[in-house]
Image (cartoon, rainbow, N blue to C red):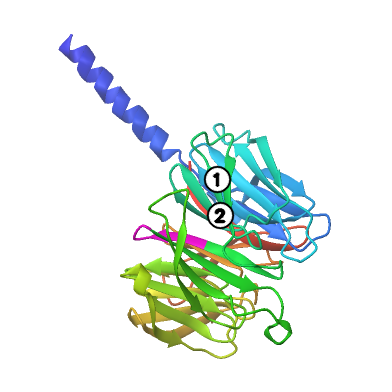
Amino acid sequence: MKKVIVYMVFFLIIFSVILLGSEKTYALMGTINSEDQNYAYILDATDPSNIKTVFASNEEMSVDLTYRKNDFVYFATTETVPNFEYSDFFVVDIEDINKPKEIFRIRDNNGQFVLIAENDPYLYIGGYQAGLYIVDVSNPSTPEIVKIIKIRDFTGVDGIKGAKIYNDYLFLTSLSMVAELEYSEESKLGLYIVDISSHLEPSVKKYIYTGHHGIFGFNIIDNLLYACIDGVGLNIYDVSNPIETNLVETIEYNYPNPSDICFNGDYAYVGDMGQGILVFKMNGPTEFELVNNITDPSYVTLKLEIFENILYSASADKGLTIYNLENPENPELIGRFYIPAGAAYCLKIFKK
């Protein structure tokens, strides 16, 4: 009997190892800026040299949001222009990753679903001119909008885009999609620090004006918030005490148009909408040294993510590009996924 139990345990361990070993790497990606070919993709990127389409939904509006929660994937279509009519937030069931299927869709005409921060069971979603969406995902297959919080009197040419939670506070960023010289609204572009201790009653505790177009993308690590600001570069804020957030450093570089920033060890990778990917050696949290500029195959980078020492880039009309970071100062292009039209815009990597 003991031998039987030992054998059963042994085979159970072997079976578990096989299952874990069979995990694959997937990329969620959305495309924008095409009149009739904006796609929501689920891609098998396990072999970067042979990326395969697992799911593709052709949407009439730009796909600006991708997110995964358990066995469900969320996409959202929006238009960041003043004359938008509605936005869709839809759910794809990936329990069987080889047979994804759309199972639920919310249509809303108040704002636009852009970027997500999660505080289970709620998602806080930048809603552009609507302000902030609070979505209940206690049942992730059928999310429900429970509240829309008006942050400012946004018009549609400006609004809330970014959302991240850090130290129990919600950080929201706003931006404008029109040129600064044409932007005539009051000063409302920058960073909003929001108390979410009462989950359904968020309260703005501090606002920091950044000017220009506002903040396109940002990241938070080790009590520092790195904000991508067109025409400036990177603003670095101390967020160790969120309600006393303050600017500690600005990283300038030539012709800055940064879109996103991510980190890997002592290196920061900055996506730029005119210069591809900038590689900075970090000699300290606020000391950046530019060591490389990657423009193969694209000068336009809209979203970056690092996963298991691999850099993934939503590279506009060049689609998804993938780089090996074994040599962190000289990323090696190891894979691409071409798109039929528009621009690769949003990105999320996961294993399943």
Q: Is label 2 in contact with label 1 (beta carbons under 8 Å)?
A: yes
> In the rendered image, which residue does mark 2 sit on?
125
Q: What residue is drawn where x is 57% and y is 47%?
A: 147
Check residue 164 for magenta coloring.
yes
The answer to whether 254 appears left or right of 306 in the picture is right
**Pointer 2 or 1: first along the chain:** 2
> In the rendered image, which residue does mark 1 sit on?
135
Answer with the quarter of the image where residue 247 lies. Answer: bottom left
Q: Nearer the viewer, residue 314 or 322?
A: 314
Check residue 154 for magenta coloring.
no
Residue type at mark 2 is Ile
Q: Nearer the viewer, residue 117 or 12?
A: 117
Q: What residue is drawn where x is 71% and y is 87%?
A: 181
- Secondary structure state at the residue bearing disc 2: strand
Span colored in magenta: 163-168
Residue 326 place in picture, x, y as percent: 41, 67
**Crowd around label 1: few <14 · some 14–19 · many ≥20 (10 Å):** many
Q: Is residue 328 visible?
A: no
The Cα atoms of the two marked residues, 2 and 1, are separated by: 8 Å
Residue type at mark 1 is Val
Q: Is residue 44 above or below residue 335?
A: above
In the picture, the quarter occupied by the N terminus is top left
Q: Nearer the viewer, residue 178 or 220?
A: 178
The answer to whether 147 appears left or right of 200 in the picture is right
Residue 149 place in picture, x, y as percent: 57, 56
**Crowd around label 2: few <14 · some 14–19 · many ≥20 (10 Å):** many
